Image (spheres, helix red, strand yellow):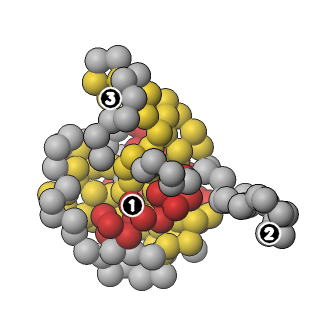
Amino acid sequence: MPHLFYYLDYTVSVFVVYGRKVLLVDHKQLKRWLPVGGHIDPNEDPQTAALRETREESGLEVELIGARPPDGMPGTTPLTAPAYLDVHDIKGEHRHLGMIYFARASTDDVRLADAEHDGIRWFLEEELDDPAWGLMDSIQFYSKEALRRVGS
């Protein structure tokens, strides 16, 4: 999806965990390993965007992990809260307000979205610090946090 606003767009990133591994994709355009995710579409809530992006980019149906208010409040749709929020630079003055989700997968059988990514891979925690992968500090941090909070 193209940028909707000049200065700031709203995005979701989903750090999917299966067992003791976290899923990352090799982003074709950015040439770096990132979690699945993307822009929140107009009229879409962040939880729906997180589940959609995960399905589109990996083929996985996941369970989002996080606090959630109870059902049954008229006029209110409870949503799973992101684990973290951040604002990160994209290009020039453009930035993304990122909603960082952690999720649990019931399988490690993934599908590459080859239009967007050059690779898809499950990483063990000890691989996250390996300079050969060139992971940004933020990706290492969120990946380790996801493994700590979600891993079994």
Q: Looking at the image, can residue 129 be seen?
A: yes
Which residue does the image show at 59% across and 43% down from the upper left? 84
Question: Which residue matches tag 2?
Answer: 71
Q: Earlier in the sequence, mark 2 or mark 1?
A: 1
Which residue does the image show at 20% across and 55% down from the upper left? 116
150 relative to 100, above or below: below
- Mark nearest the camera among 2 and 1 is 2
Q: Position of residue 86 (x, y in %)?
A: 53, 34
Q: Residue 114's quadrant in the figure? A: bottom left
| Residues under numbered marks 2 and 3 in contact, where contact means CB atoms less than 8 Å apart | no
Question: Which residue matches tag 3?
Answer: 90
Count of marks, rendered view: 3
Q: Amino acid at mark 3?
A: Ile
Q: Position of residue 35 (x, y in %)?
A: 37, 53
Q: Earlier in the sequence, mark 2 or mark 3?
A: 2
Nearer-the-camera pick, 17 or 124:
17
Q: Is residue 56 left or right of residue 12?
A: left
Label 1 and label 3: CA atoms lie apart by 19 Å
Which residue does the image show at 51% across and 51% down from the upper left? 43
Mark 3 neighbour density, 10 Å: few (under 14) some (14–19) many (20 or more): few
Q: Secondary structure at mark 2?
A: loop
Q: Is residue 1 left or right of residue 14?
A: left
